[in-house]
């Protein structure tokens, strides 16, 4: 291999920013060769150097240059060199923070699984007991409240002028402590449809000066009545639920409180100075009507309805019965079957329910916690048996990298 004369070493080690052109990079590589004891370097174009010598050159350069961070660090005569400015670093000032890593063993996942099981199973039992303590009565009335003469012609009946009054009876299975919540439940009603959700004007509800802001309400049938803005506009308000319920026990009326049934955050979206105007006066009548004398903020049945549900089956609060219902009581319900669910094959149910510290009746949370906790317990038991039958010898933890001294011994 032909050698050329060694060039003098640069006075100071160049920084990365100084290695921008090819000539500076070449001089830096040659300086590295000189410093590491290599007496020569291959010729640029006509050298007969081998591949190994070229790789040795690259390895030596990479000792100083880190491709990830753009910095390089060298070790010269036992002193650390900062690759950016070439200053020496006092290794006595470099601190190593103490750390601890849990040595893996077969009992580690077993302990974790048992901990999850011990946490989830009690929570699941408490949640399931809370759900089972809720007393709930359901009554489906959409089919029963259709006269025999209109069987098969439900849409014609619900849209006609016939009397929609229907009387049903409900029996209280267990003692129901006040307050007893009255819900209506709808099936196959998609309040989460994109067009339905967007068909409202929040600006119109919060300020009477914005009654003409109906651009987001969509179709004119729901936003204008004879070229006059409808307040509130949109499909949500237009489809307001309008079935009514009257309760009696032993021929004595049971009062239903319809105040305080909406969320405060929802009420804040309605102004006490906004009143309904020209509502349900268009060509197509949707659901219920509103009291033009009362402000929209005071009509909580509208506020509850306009909080759209995320699923096609949902409940909404109708009111509260603020007296206890005893086991065996017969509750007479006089209801008005006004709301049209027959056009979309929907269902209507009346629900009376108490609550617990966890809310209404819902077994899903308790069952989910019990399922996860039981599965973790079974896995922990299986791992324990497998480890006892076929134990695996562990290695010496002193050979782990974090247990070694800095010198490597």
Image (spheres, rainbow, N blue to C red):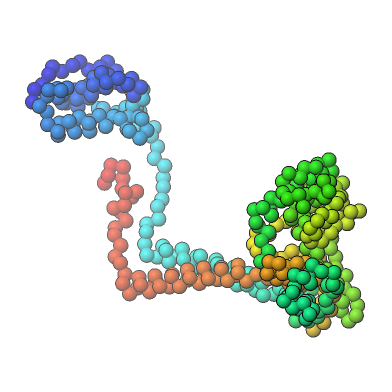
Residue situated in front as seen by the camera: 4 or 286: 286
**Residue 127 visible somewhere in the drawing:** yes
Task: Tally the marks.
Answer: 0
Dividing the picture into quadrants, the one containing residue 170 is bottom right
* Percent x, y of residue 225: 82, 50
User: Is residue 135 shown above or below 1?
Assistant: below
Relative placement, left or right, of 219 versus 370 is right
Residue situated in front as seen by the camera: 197 or 137: 197
**Residue 321 visible somewhere in the drawing:** no
Residue at the (27%, 21%) spot, across then down? 22
User: Is residue 219 shown above or below 130?
Assistant: above
Dividing the picture into quadrants, the one containing residue 369 is bottom right
Relative placement, left or right, of 398 versus 172 is left
Quarter of the image with the N terminus is: top left
* Residue projecting furthest to the left: 1
* Percent x, y of residue 325: 82, 77
Residue at the (65%, 70%) spot, across then down? 362
* Percent x, y of residue 328: 79, 84
Residue at the (62%, 71%) spot, across then down? 363
* Percent x, y of residue 389: 33, 74
Residue at the (74%, 54%) spot, across then down? 235
Relative placement, left or right, of 241 versus 188 is right
Relative placement, left or right, of 257 versus 188 is right
């Amino acid at each position: 291999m032909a050698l050329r004369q060694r060039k003098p070493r640069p006075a100071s080690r160049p920084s990365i920013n100084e290695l921008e052109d090819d000539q500076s990079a070449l001089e830096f590589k040659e300086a590295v060769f000189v410093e590491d004891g290599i007496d020569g370097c291959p010729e640029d174009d006509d050298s007969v150097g081998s591949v190994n010598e070229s790789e040795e050159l690259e390895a030596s350069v990479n000792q100083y240059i880190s491709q990830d961070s753009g910095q390089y660090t060298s070790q010269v005569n036992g002193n650390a060199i900062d690759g950016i400015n070439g200053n020496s670093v006092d290794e006595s000032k470099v601190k190593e923070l103490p750390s601890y890593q849990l040595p893996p063993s077969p009992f580690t996942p077993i302990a974790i699984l048992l901990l999850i099981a011990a946490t989830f199973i009690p929570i699941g039992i408490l949640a399931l007991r809370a759900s089972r303590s809720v007393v709930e009565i359901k009554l489906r009335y959409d089919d029963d409240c259709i006269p025999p003469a209109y069987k098969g012609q439900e849409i014609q009946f619900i849209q006609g002028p016939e009397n929609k009054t229907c009387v049903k009876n409900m029996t209280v299975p267990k003692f129901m402590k006040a307050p007893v919540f009255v819900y209506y439940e709808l099936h196959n009603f998609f309040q989460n449809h994109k067009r339905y959700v967007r068909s409202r004007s929040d600006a119109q509800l919060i300020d009477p000066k914005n009654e003409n802001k109906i651009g987001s309400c969509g179709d004119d049938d729901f936003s204008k009545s004879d070229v006059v803005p409808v307040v509130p506009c949109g499909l949500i308000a237009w489809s307001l639920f309008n079935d009514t319920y009257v309760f009696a026990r032993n021929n004595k009326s049971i009062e239903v409180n319809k105040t305080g049934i909406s969320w405060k955050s929802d009420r804040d979206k309605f102004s006490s100075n906004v009143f309904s105007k020209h509502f349900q006066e268009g060509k197509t009548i949707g659901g219920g009507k509103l009291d033009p004398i009362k402000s929209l903020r005071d009509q909580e049945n509208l506020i509850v309805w306009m909080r759209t549900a995320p699923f096609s089956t949902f409940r909404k609060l109708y009111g509260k019965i603020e007296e206890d219902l005893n086991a065996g009581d017969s509750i007479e319900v006089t209801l008005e079957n006004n709301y049209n669910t027959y056009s979309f094959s929907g269902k209507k149910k009346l629900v009376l329910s108490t609550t617990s510290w966890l809310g209404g009746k819902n077994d899903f949370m308790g069952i989910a916690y019990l399922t996860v906790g039981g599965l973790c317990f079974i896995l922990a038991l299986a791992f324990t048996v497998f480890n006892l039958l076929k134990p695996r010898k562990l290695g010496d933890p002193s050979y782990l990298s974090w247990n070694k001294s800095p010198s490597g011994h």
